[in-house]
Image (cartoon, rainbow, N blue to C red):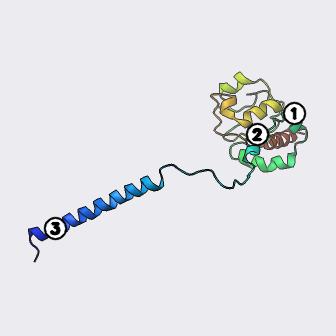
Amino acid sequence: MFDTMTFTKIAASFCGALLILLLGKWAAEELYHSGGHGEQSYVIDTGAEEADEEAIEVAFADVYASADAEAGVRLFRQCSACHKAEAGENGVGPYLHGVVGREVGSTDYASYSGALSEVAEVWTPENLNGFLENPRGWAPGTSMGYNGLKDIEDRANLIAYLDSLDD
């Protein structure tokens, strides 16, 4: 019943069916997808053009003037993984009690990177803002492994909280 000729006929019929299927698929693709689509009949306005406009740049001094130190408490939780708020108590990083207005590298923390003292002499609110926005971009070579806070209001609130620590 199954001899060589029967097996050859079955294999040839499968190959022929596959060839017809592939040629039919190719013909259908050419027929129905040749020119693409025409114009849309109705366009829904999503306001995407308005969202693409550049954001208005706000001065840090204006945002810092209205900063909320209580909101900064919540943000300090991220910092507390490495830094302490108590004076003289270093963690993985230096303590942040009295950091606003303090000279860069003036604590007894032993592992300061030299990149910070090359960029600034005193931790002013503006210097802290630049550092907290992008630590590695503001002070290339810093050993701080934090990516930064992108929101200017969050940075202002955090700096206001740090400024309130030492009265």
Q: Which amino acid is tagged 1?
A: Ala
Q: CA distance from mark 2 to mark 3?
A: 68 Å
Q: CA distance from mark 1 to mark 3?
A: 86 Å
Q: Which amino acid is tagged 2?
A: Glu
Q: What residue is pinned by disc 2?
A: 53
User: Which label was assigned to residue 9?
Assistant: 3
Vertical arrangement, residue 35 with respect to residue 56, above or below: below
Q: Earlier in the sequence, mark 1 or mark 3?
A: 3
Mark 1, Cα crowd under 10 Å, few <14 / some 14-19 / many 20+, is few
Residue at 70%, 33% in the rendered image = 109
- Along the line of sight, which residue is nearer the eye, 71 or 107? 71
Query: Which picture quadrant has residue 52?
Result: top right
Q: What residue is pinned by disc 1?
A: 61
Question: Is the N terminus in the top left, top right, bottom left or bottom right quadrant?
Answer: bottom left
Tell me the element at label 2.
Answer: loop
- Along the line of sight, which residue is nearer the eye, 138 or 52? 52
Q: Which amino acid is tagged 3?
A: Lys
Which is more foreground, mark 1 or mark 2? 2
Q: Position of residue 119 (x, y in %)?
A: 72, 23
Circles 2 and 3 in contact, beta carbons < 8 Å:
no
Q: CA distance from mark 1 to mark 2?
A: 24 Å
Q: Earlier in the sequence, mark 1 or mark 2?
A: 2
